[in-house]
Amino acid sequence: MKRNTLIAALVLAVLLGALALALSREGGDVAPEVITWSVPPLAAAPRLEVTAPGAPLTLSRASGAWRLVQPVEAPVAEPAAQALDKALQGGLKADRALDLPADPKRYGLGDDAPTLALFDGDQLKARLRVGKEEVVEGTFVRRTWVHPEGEQRIYRVQAGLRTDLLKAPDDWRERAITSFDEPDVTALTLAVGGSTLRLQRADAGWTLEEPAGIALDVPAVQRLIAAAGRLRAEGFGEGVTADAAGLTAPRGRLTFALRDKPAVTLLVGAQQPAPPAAEGEPQRPGVTWLQVEGAPTLYTIPAFTADSLLKGLGDLRSKEMLNLDAAEVQRLTLSAAPPGGPARVLERTPEGWRQTAPAPAPVDPARADALLKALTKLRARSIPDVTPEEAGLAGAAPWRQIDLGLTSGATTTLYLGATTGADDKDRFARLGADGLIFVLPAWTLDAVAQLDAPGAPP
């Protein structure tokens, strides 16, 4: 039994040795300990040419800055330029070398492998096939197998050439479109939807100069400027004309006057829907064309980002519709809903609120206070461009009317119209018969409903 086991072990050892020898011959012989091949450091004006599936790509550095030369002229983004410099600084050195294997594809070096040509000025320094990239075990250090043109050996260079160099053209490009902050902006002109707004920075914030006399929603203005000041490209429009992108007659034209810098004008063009998603994949949002006036590059940005720029008066004017001291309100008159029934009148007394019509009755003080708080601090959800007929506010019988009688003897009237949609609880509203139409959020209306709810004194 022991003899059989010993024989089996010897046979296994012989087979393993033969297999190791075969693999060694197939993969190439290990290089001598000292590897003399390298690509020396390039001078101050290097050039790289990458040939891969798709269009050839050329990068060059002049005056210390990398630029994409082919297939399009464009500056290289700073992070990509830094990665490129890091990969090439000190040249390319190898830490492993093998004789050219019978099957170069094992190392990603087949005939279809990308080719990297490195120039020092106009002088070709090296032309390499770029193969598989490896990560040194237990580290984040990357290595890449290459096959220099004319060599019978392959080398593992001390750089992640695939990660750092084999990028699509758009991945080299600078995607930052704008770079300014809200405090940098001194004035803003918005031409959107056929109307023009002119905003000016003032000591107290932002004021609307055209049209004049309308208070602004300053946080809304600040959000617009913040979005405009940090725009990033989703893509680029090589081969697309400004006319095709809707930029010769843009949907929006936004000019930002900047402190100590030239003004920036953004042209917002046509929206382009995303292609249908593959089955089981989420649908991507569409994009919108954008251009910085005076610059040739056409960009795409997410459609929702463009929507944050295309703001009109209704979006930027103050949403504060009414701001009264609750103590000034002495009487509340609420018409019935639907119209036609008797109005309900609540009056302030030394003992608190009481109902005086249609019949005297006590009033739940908590519900009365909630209603008063909602009505004296009215804030619109939005200010849409709708007609009184569309808002259900035409004629003498809106859905509901609420009169606030004040200490001064004046009366402020709130008219409530139709809901904003079949499934919505928000309603159109206006202050006064000819006031601005706005959307009143449902939570404000809830205070009215609570006063009408069962359990509230009639």
Image (spheres, rainbow, N blue to C red):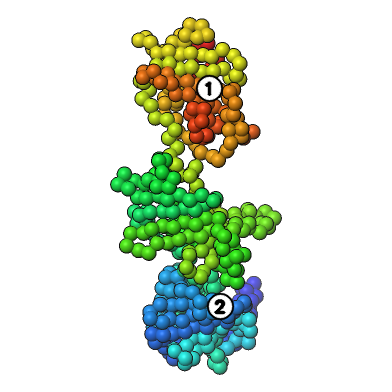
Above or below, 27 against 136 in this view is below
Q: Mark 1 points at which residue?
A: 401
Give the position of the N terminus as an image quadrant.
bottom right
- Whether residue 244 is visible here, answered yes or no, is yes
Tell whether 36 sits left or right of 5.
Answer: left
Q: Where is residue 454 in the image (x, y as percent from the top left)?
A: 55, 15
Q: Position of residue 19 (x, y in %)?
A: 62, 82
Above or below, 32 against 230 in this view is below
Residue occupying image coordinates x 57% and y 60%:
249
Tell whether 41 sits left or right of 270.
Answer: left
Of tags 2 and 1, the one toward the viewer is 1
Residue occupying image coordinates x 53% and y 70%:
170
Q: Where is residue 30 in the image (x, y as percent from the top left)?
A: 51, 87
- What type is the residue that disc 1 sits on? Gln
Q: Name the residue under label 2.
A: 71
Q: What number is the disc on residue 253?
A: none
Residue occupying image coordinates x 47% and y 20%:
403
Q: Which of the two discs, 2 and 1, labels the residue nearer the N terminus?
A: 2
Q: Which of 335 and 369 is in front in this view?
A: 335
- Residue 36, quarter of picture: bottom left
- What type is the residue that disc 2 sits on? Pro
Q: Nearer the viewer, residue 219 or 197?
A: 197
Tell whether 68 sits left or right of 112.
Answer: left
Residue occupying image coordinates x 51% and y 49%:
195
Spatial CA span between label 2 and label 1: 66 Å
Under tag 1, what secondary structure? strand
